[in-house]
Image (cartoon, grey):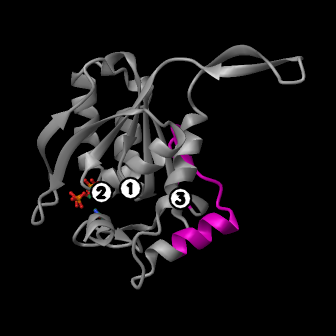
Amino acid sequence: MSSADKKYELPSNAIVLPPTAQLQALLTLIRDEKTQRYSDRIIRLLVEEGLNHLPVVPKTVRTPVGLDFDGVGFEGRICGVSIMRAGEAMEAGLRDCCRSVRIGKILIQRDEETCLPKLFYAKLPEDIAERFVLLLDPMLATGGSCIKAIEVLLSHGVKEEKILFLNLIASPLGTDAVCKRFPKLRMITAWVDEGLDSHSYIVPGLGDFGDRYFL
Ligand code: PRP
Ligand code: URA
């Protein structure tokens, strides 16, 4: 079903969620042309996996029974950055896990004729260069929008290795374009689909994510 299962060789900095029965059922729901807005549980899985890639340091706490537990705590600060509009659908999932997380926004839209990305606007936390960035966009087709967003982050001083790109459905072309151009970034996706159609839509995909989620 997934290209990742067949011949496509995933770049080493791309991570695909384990294709559990639950994930496949959720992906089936969101792809169904008769449904809308079922992506929140998959987004939550992506955020949890993204957080797994953040560094931790040893931390000891005292439990209510008066004993120490030697565990770990997160090291370093994070922020989210959504690629508008569709990426905004992933913000609530990030906030569910990290309640007061700061979230920046980059408005990039694909030209409907050429499918090339156009950057309109970016509003990012002023100290973003010191943070890990969870970059949010559910669809990765040609990779153009994501690459433009990463260029904006890099131009604001974010280190490539501190970018975690969270994505629902990717094409092999987009995965290669992003992961090979930025080998120190990590991409986490729920599924790699077969490819793109003549309009650069992901196939089988789910159509226009933004329209299905917000309209
Ligand atoms: C979609 C999607 C990505 C982009 C993917 O956004 O959310 O940002 O297309 O395509 P690409 O990999 O070929 O660049 P779109 O520009 O359609 O805007 P939207 O978020 O308003 O739907
Ligand atoms: N944007 C979407 O929303 N879906 C696609 O398949 C490609 C770009």
Badge 2 residue CB within 8 Å of ligand 1: yes
Residue 208: where, in percent of width, then height?
29, 69
The residue tagged 2 is 86
The residue tagged 1 is 138
Q: Is residue 8 above or below residue 58?
A: below
Crowd tier of the residue under label 2, counting other residues whose Cα lies within 10 Å: few below 14, some 14–19, many 20 or above: many
Q: Amino acid at mark 3?
A: Ile
In this view, which residue lies farthest toward the bottom? Answer: 34
Residue 111: where, in percent of width, then height?
11, 59
Q: Quick one: 87 or 177, which is closer to the camera? A: 87
Q: Quick one: 97 or 105, which is closer to the camera? A: 97
Where residue 120 sits, quadrant-wise, is: top left
Crowd tier of the residue under label 1, counting other residues whose Cα lies within 10 Å: few below 14, some 14–19, many 20 or above: many
Magenta region, residue range: 7-28
Q: Quadrant of ligand 2?
A: bottom left
Q: Is residue 93 above or below residue 184?
A: below
Looking at the image, tell me whether mark 1 or mark 3 is earlier in sequence order. Answer: 3
Looking at the image, tell me whether mark 2 or mark 3 is earlier in sequence order. Answer: 3
Looking at the image, tell me whether mark 2 or mark 1 is earlier in sequence order. Answer: 2
**Side (left or right) of 51 relative to 187:** right
The alpha-carbon separation of the residues under discs 2 and 3 comes to: 15 Å
Q: Is disc 2 in contact with disc 1, using a CB cutoff of under 8 Å?
A: yes
